[in-house]
Image: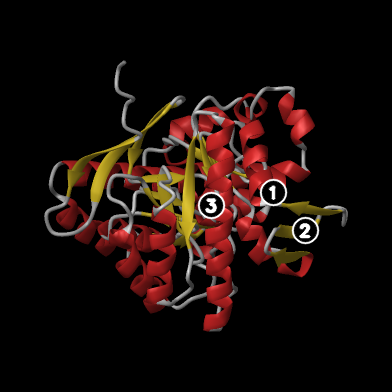
Amino acid sequence: MAEKPSFFVETARDKDSHARAGIIATGRGNIKTPVFMPVGTAGTVKGLTGRQLVECGAQIILGNTYHLFLRPGLEVIDLFSSLHGFMGWSGPILTDSGGFQIFSLRDRSRVEEGGVHFQSHLDGTPFFLTPQDVVAIQNRLDSDIQMVLDCFAPYPAQRAEDERALTLTGAWAARAREAFLKSGRGRRQFAIVQGGLHLDLRELSLDQLKTLDFDGYAVGGLSVGEQPGEFEEIVNFIMPRLPSDRPRYLMGCGSPEEIVFAVSRGADMFDCVLPTRNARNGTLFTSRGKLRIKNEKYKKDENPLDPNCHCYTCRHHSRAYLRHLYLAGEILAAVLNTVHNLHFYLDFMSEMRYAINSGEFGTWKDSFLSGISD
């Protein structure tokens, strides 16, 4: 019998850091890492078609189990055999579990050992989800990578709160792993390391999860209000400790500076709403730093957003036109701004992969960070 292909293969590693490039193999296509995953919470990356996502360079997108379970509901998605069919997206999809909603909707949720009681943010309907339920929902979505249901304490938290969240996360992960393997779906499942800002709890969480032999490992519970130094301390400590033969995913990590730092510590996968949300709010990322398109100085500016960018927006439209669209409240402003911001993110990730594979990560990193800090 032929040996099953490896899910993750490392193709290059930087000689002066933990930065690495690799390939994640899925049934719907290979993913080159490091990779940024545009967030499509409700089955759409806001403002963009699937074709536009491909043109921006998206390899994989993210959906949210909690939101899709509520709306449109599994009965609707079942008609299309998968979330991919429903969306018209043929590439890989990673689905988050709903663990973040325990945090973000904590006034509408209650955690117990068995699972989570939610009150729908749409109509108030109560429902209860176990870790096994979340696996079953993601199986029906047919996501290529599933995240387990996890729990983390809001920032700032007492050590006892982080210990309880860690205990629940570990117990839920074991139940989710058993349910996932019994289902025999042939997809992949990732665990999520918790522990707050406590290094020993982070290490304990990882040690527990490694015994369950997940396909990949994520670091959760960050980018929720902690200080930059706290973020860097946790990433610096835990990321290189994640299994090197599996993908390493830093959840919710947003700014380009944070992503570059995390890659230097060995992270492979990222997601965040920052590029799309900022686009809708008129803040654009460029190779020369952030640009706020509503500013008066762009009223008659004939230049593109970024002279170094080759996205559709920069090839066809001026800053003056984009400012007009934004101030006029035109829908096209959100579309064109989102095209640019996502292209910027996916392009610098592509450049970073090339730099790692060619042995020039350090030089590229210094040049890139210097440019965006201007």
Q: Earlier in the sequence, mark 1 or mark 3?
A: 1
| Left or right, residue 252 beside residue 245 | right
The residue lying toward the viewer, choosing from 322 and 22, is: 22
Q: Quadrant of residue 151?
A: bottom right
- Amino acid carrying mark 1 in the image: Tyr
- Amino acid carrying mark 3 in the image: Ala
The residue beneath circle 2 is 118
Bin the neighbour count of mark 1 within 10 Å (Cα to Cα): few under 14, some 14-19, many 20 and up. Answer: many
Q: Quadrant of residue 231?
A: bottom left
The residue beneath circle 1 is 66
Disc 3 from disc 2: Cα separation: 22 Å
Disc sitting over residue 174 in the figure: 3
Q: Earlier in the sequence, mark 1 or mark 2?
A: 1
Taking 110 as reference, is 313 above or below it? above
Q: In x, y percent, where is residue 318?
A: 48, 45
Taking 231 as reference, is 74 above or below it? above
Quadrant in which the C terminus is drawn: bottom left
Disc sitting over residue 216 in the figure: none
- Amino acid carrying mark 2 in the image: Phe
Bin the neighbour count of mark 2 within 10 Å (Cα to Cα): few under 14, some 14-19, many 20 and up. Answer: many
Quadrant in which the N terminus is drawn: top left
Residue furthest out toward the top: 1
Q: In x, y percent, where is residue 186?
A: 49, 28
Q: Nearer the viewer, mark 3 or mark 2?
A: 3
Residue found at x 48% / y 65%: 194
Does dot 2 land on a helix, a strand or a loop?
strand
| Left or right, residue 176 beside residue 291 | right
The residue lying toward the viewer, choosing from 224 and 177, is: 177
